[in-house]
Image (cartoon, rainbow, N blue to C red):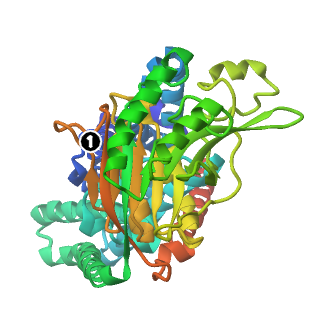
Amino acid sequence: MTFAFLRSYDSRYFIGAIVSGLLLSMAFPPLEYNSLAWVAFIPLLFVLKEMPLRQAFGWGWLSGLAFWMLSVAWLLRLAITGTNILVALSAWFSLSAYCALYTGAFSFVAAFIWQMIGVDRQWRNIWLVLILPAVWVGFEYLRSTLFTGFAWNALGICQYRQLPIIQVAEFGGVYVVSALLMMGNTALMLIGIRFYAMFRRDTNIRKLNVELMILLVFLSACMWKYFEVRKLVSLNENKCSFVRIASVQPNIPQYKKWPLQYEKEIYTRLREQTLPAIAAMPDLIVWPETVVPSLVKRDPECSAFVSDLAGLGVPILVGSLDCEITADRDVFYNSSILIMTNGTVAGQYNKRHLVLFGEYLPFEHTFKFIQKMAPLGYSCTPGTTSTVFRLEKKGIKFSALICFEDTVASLARESVRNGARLLINQTNDAWFDGSSAHVQHMAHCVFRCIENRVPAIRSANTGVTCFIDTLGRLDILEKNGMHREFADYVTGKIQIPPDDMRLTVYTLFGDLPFAVPCGIAAVFLLGWAVLTVKKCDV
């Protein structure tokens, strides 16, 4: 079944699959033609309508492959910054092929639903407009959770600048926005089919009302939610506290991160950006992930450097590796460490969601050759708990999300449930300089703010450094029209929600009310479709 599409090539299916993949990739950074996401699936859905069921998975997989190979092409930058071209190519294709499996599964189920329901009866179309979005969300959720999960570029992420649309994320996360987009694709395709039938068979145009009505109702709800939230934000300003925070972007190239000959240069860059930031009198200064060239808690020189700067009157949240020496081996952590003005450590968070092959290697102690693939030369150990830091001067509670942890919605949600009212993302995207990874990464953090209605700060080594408010509005550090690959700092006044803020539906319940049932339904329908194909083979 999987490769049946290769044995019965049809140019219509090929064009539909590839065009959908290309259009969808254009909706994401770097191009960001986000309106295309409302129509990108129409070519694929149209050919699925008449495609033999056993071919649907393969053509859907091909469509997903086209999207993912363009979407994560920034992995090829690792050939320059972290590994060799063979490993980079393998990672690029393997990840793309894996993620495309979920598009293939969706296409297989969608073709099955087409055959079950058809498009000839008006009220059956309502089920298509509702079921296909749920199936898409189900497989998107599975991709984000299975095998530690890869939550990158969920469909709704491409709408991160469309503030009225994405406010509904507080109810069910980015998956609600993904569902709206798939609903739009399905409704518009059905409307197109109706128009075509109208001109061929004089079909009454009033039959268009149901599909269009469903879509307009949901979009109207999004607009209403946006203006309601804006009103609430305005009314609650008196209850909020404010904090001034400076975020530093030192712009240290990846090849200079660890060699000893660049250690002095790194300290100089950090000092040059931090001193003027201190002069602005913020309440906290944030440095990016693993920005110091040594272990701030273990290396006296590194510790003295940070303590001297913090001693000028402003605490510093430092991204640094940390190490615990045990009888068996040294245990490394990717950490966020708060250094107070007296040089003491006021708190530490160890990254929990590590990047496969970037920060840890599976079976490295069994297969020693795997260690040669590690960019760091060793594996980090995941942390076990969420940390809520506290600025005593202002009483502000915040949590750190390191690197790609801001793509994992459950980590941000847990931090807010534990009392954090500000999220800080410390990241080093220098691995992918010159690519769209920086902006794609930032887009995920927008949704963490809306889902939990808390602000966020991003401190990125080479960009994108920014502030994000509870509505998802961005204030990006820019220089000469550029927002990455330059050294600078930015200071902002952040509005912090009160400790007794009303928690959102998503903060309280996470994916349980929406994405989880969609995932269960998707698996059920997939199994049903597979059994149907097997019965046809008997």
Looking at the image, residue 38 sits to the left or right of residue 257; the answer is left
In the picture shown, does residue 435 fall above or below 132?
Answer: above
The residue tagged 1 is 26
Image quarter for residue 252?
A: top left
Residue 342, above or below 244: above
Q: Residue at x 45, y 47 (%)?
A: 312
Q: Residue at x 26, y 80 (%)?
A: 234
Residue 512: percent from the left, percent from the top?
A: 57, 72
> In this image, 175 relative to 473: left or right?
right
Give percent across and percent down for residue 9: 39, 32
**Which residue is nearer to you in this view: 74 or 492?**
492
The residue drawn where x is 13% and y is 66% is: 198
Tell me which corner region of the image, top left, top right, bottom left or bottom right, holds residue 380: top right
Q: Is residue 103 visible?
A: no
Q: Residues within 10 Å of mark 1 (few under 14, many from 20)?
A: many
Return the residue found at the far right: 327
Kind of element beneath mark 1:
helix
Q: Is residue 421 above or below residue 360?
A: below
Q: Residue at x 75, y 28 (%)?
A: 364
Residue 126 on image: x %, y %: 34, 74
State the image quarter where residue 478 is shown.
top left
* Residue kind at label 1, given as amino acid type: Met
Q: Is residue 285 visible?
A: yes
